[in-house]
Amino acid sequence: MPIMLDDISSISNKVIRAVTPHFFSTMLTGRGGTQGVINQNLKPGRYDLGQSAHTMPLKPLNDKSKSSSNGVTIRTIPMGPLTPYSQRDSIASGNAILNVPSSAERFHVTPGRANLDFDVYVDLTPQGTVLKEDGSGDKMIRHLDVLYRMEVFLLASGSSTERVRIADTVPRPLRLPDAAGKLVPQEFAFVGYSFAPLDDIEAMIDMISVQFSPTGQGVHVDVAGLATWMSDYDLYDRICRQAEIWSSAAIGEAVAEHVENLFAQSSVSDPELNRLAAQLRYLENYTVPLEAYRVIYDAIRRVAPAQVADVLAKQNMNLLMNGTMAALEDLKPQLAVPPFNPQAIAALPSKFSAQQREAITTAEPLSLTTAGAGTGKSTTILARIDYLTACGIDPKEITVLSFTNAAADNILAKNPKVGSMTISRMVLDIYKLNHPTHQVSTIDTMVNTLDIFYPNDDMVRAFRRRLIEVDKNQDGATTALNAFVEQHFDAVMTVLNSIEQTCLELQIIIAYQQIDQMAEPPHLAGKFLIVDEVQDNSIFEFVYLLRYVTKHKQNMFIVGDASQTLYEFRSANPKALNALEGSGVFKTYKLTTNYRSNQEILDFANVHLADIEANALSQIRLQANSLSQPTAKSFQEKVQLKYCTAQSQKSFKEDLPGYMLNVVKPYVDACLARGEKVAFLSYKKTDLQLMQASLEKFYPGQQIADITSKRRRPTTIFSQYVKLFWNDVKQVQPGDASLVIYKGITDNLDQIAGRSAATVRTFIQKIVSDWWIAQGPTVDSWVRLFNQGSLKREEFFDRLMRNILDYEIDQNGLKQMVLNQQNRQRKEQNNQGNANLIMSTIHGAKGLEFDNVVVLHQYDTVLPEDQKRMFYVAFTRAMKSELVLSFGKQKNAAIETDYQLIVNALERRERIDLLRKQGLNLDAMSAEEVEAALSTLMTEEAQDAAPTAAVAPINGTSSAPTNDAASAAVPVPA
Ligand SMILES: Nc1ncnc2c1ncn2[C@@H]1O[C@H](COP(=O)(O)OP(=O)(O)OP(=O)(O)O)[C@@H](O)[C@H]1O
């Protein structure tokens, strides 16, 4: 039985969390107090000396951006759900509405003015901020400017209206008769934007009130009172509220309302459509819930003409996914399904649970299995292949897409006849067949090549910029590149055909856009598509797969766990599975029994799982496949926690050898004595190396396997050289060109390799001399042709240039291939090797399991979601026991309190069981009576334990390790 989190009140409270300004940017520190950029001095007010509305334009707040020059970095961080442009269009449509703020929030401009039949109120909403970081001096200076939406409300005296129309001009007539025929002012709001509302809002108030007041003069504004109201303005809270809108269904409603406002007009102009497209792209600046996209998508489909809706849906990847899913749903009845085969169902091995059987044998054309860690997702995929085959489906008809090469190899090793690959490989195979002359290059090499061949082409310059944005993984970059390629398709293809290059990021976009025309290799023609670890696919990969399935009317069986999303940095969205689950397009199956770990390990993991946002919808709680009930003692034996306070990572690293000796070694000794393996997991490779150094000292005879995948940066040295120095080469005789290139690269390394020149010098010298040796004979043959007069000088240099560019691409591809192979072999060591000690990054351990695990955990009071998910993956790798070595600055860490709460809850359960065994009928007793009985039992236990009081504490906090083994507060398992 898992320990119920509801029994551990402080833990279950954790799922309720506020959204903070960090939602917009982690640079927005402070909570309106003395610290951080959002501090108590930051209030709406007047312009700084020398500033005015003219020096602070609104335009930048239509996008999130970062620019640096001369040590000064400027970031624009928008916060309004609608950009100022969209807001203006909505207002112009005559349909925009604004909530009237409560009397506690707004400033009343016209209090006690009995001679007026109207009231004027004011409020401010942060629309965005501009953060300036000046590092040019000794100290970094941060300055934040806030752009406010100024809201001026004109309401009839005594009105309790909650929502008013936003007007762009004062309505005429000013007053209309009410039900009783009395003339009352028309109510409305005006909005404007300002970085200094105390300077700018008075003019707005004046402009409105002058037209309503009986004297024809504007109302008096108590500027001192307004300044006091602004000095009480809680900016932190207001930014939090904006963040809440963005991270909830409210953003969907706000944008859908805007879409409806625009299309309620008799016609929508092209500039308005362009600004709406920009608004939809603007949403990609932040993580908007996918359910909100559904609302926006539905609104677009409802009100926009079909062709316009198609174009709009392509402006944002998440809208595109909604659109693609809707098309797939329409086709559902035509998709492939396995034939009903009772023998195949009966032949399933008996070990499979009912839940697993349901998923494995599903006859649905589109199915999604969501499941927690260790619940048998990978096992279910293997069984699905067997099941489909048993149903008479040719294995060639089955394609399995995995996230890593290692996982794809694993499927292939067990099922040599099915198609098994990564999505990148699938796209590559299709692309290569259709564009065989394009070599797969990197974005860096491509950009250099574009600069070399198209230095003055506007289209190429824009294309290049889009590629760089994708390379930097900027928000919305893939959407922008996709839209760009679609708009300039023929021109882009002409350029790619001429440079004979492409890159992975472009391949999928082109394959997507040409999906209906592209030929496909026979090994991809299968009717049954299975996708593993779907949570880590980027939204665009997912959109592509949905279209692929639509095109081939395939059966799609997908499996994933949102809480294990690790690749958000390459555009995976942990909430995508929730959206699929909620869409109703996929039949959903759930696996809840964990077959890997004991319940003690899962109780600890469950505490962390409860705190993961991506689990909020599915509310998965891991339960072991065992009837044995954990006790406080068994929990402390199987899950050990050592929390270490450390002022910095550096100081923890200095202390790490001490912790390895006093805490980790006793634990590992016990595991090895039981003949079991131990894996060491950490986020950083450098920490693993430190741990490994200690292990090598403690266990000189033990084999240690490092299964972490290695990475390498592709080189751009040749293309960079050609871009900057090719004219030098063209000045010399062809016979001297190779030497000039060799010397040119090594002599100009500072310019070519930038800051890394010093560290890569030897490496670069080697690759340039490798080129010379490898390509020497070819270049010499061209030199001979030139000398004989059968090759023109220009043609010689053209061939030479292409030769070195091709060499760079080949080398990058070759080295990556070798590295992939080595990485696979490294992973294999875990399965087949003799090593008892295994080192891996947490990312590298995904999908794997080990007898025992040591997790290096970095604690913080508020961990970002990606780190929570990462540590959850780490906490679910062990089968038998785990030791968590956690470090952080805080003295009282919640990870310790949570651990102790689990122990307390288990002890309480044991005592309740004992009372029941003693014959007490607890169900018939009141809560107070149960507590009294428990308290008596505890007193008796304390009396029994009194003579042996000198028991070491279970877990302890220490600020530095000692060499005294007895002080290692973690008990070693029996
Ligand atoms: N029905 C079952 N009976 C017994 N063992 C099972 C069963 N299903 C799965 N297992 C075992 O449970 C362990 C976890 O399974 P598997 O690796 O398939 O889970 P997973 O959901 O893919 O895990 P993760 O997401 O954490 O990588 C494996 O050792 C597997 O052999």
Image: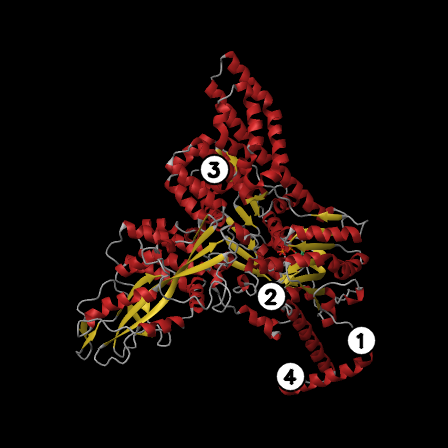
Q: Residue furthest top?
A: 788
Say which amino acid is labelled 3: Val
Render colour scheme? secondary structure
Mark 2: which secondary structure?
loop
Say which amino acid is labelled 2: Arg
Q: Nearer the viewer, residue 210 or 573?
A: 210
Q: Nearer the viewer, residue 244 or 737?
A: 737
Residue 631 as seen in the image, left or right of residue 336:
right
Say which amino acid is labelled 4: Asp
Q: Position of residue 245 (x, y in %)?
A: 42, 64
Q: Residue at x 55, y 27 (%)?
A: 741
Q: Nearer the viewer, mark 1 or mark 4?
A: 1
Crowding at mark 2 (Cα within 10 Å: few <14, some 14-19, many 20+)? many
**Which numbered disc covers residue 923?**
4
Q: Nearer the viewer, mark 3 or mark 2?
A: 3
Q: Do callouts 1 and 4 mark residues in contact (Cβ within 8 Å)?
A: no
Q: Position of residue 464 (x, y in %)?
A: 44, 40
What is the C-alpha distance between the residues marked 3 and 1? 69 Å
- The residue tagged 2 is 621
Q: Is residue 2 visible?
A: no
What is the C-alpha distance between the residues marked 3 and 2? 47 Å
What is the C-alpha distance between the residues marked 4 and 2? 26 Å
- The residue tagged 1 is 950
Q: Position of residue 513 (x, y in %)?
A: 42, 42
Query: Which mark is first along the chain, 1 or 2?
Result: 2
Mark 1: which secondary structure?
loop
- The residue tagged 3 is 447
Query: Which mark is first along the chain, 4 or 1?
Result: 4
Ligand 1 within 8 Å, label 3 CB: no
Q: Residue at x 69, y 44 (%)?
A: 826
Q: Which quadrant is the C terminus positioned in?
A: bottom right
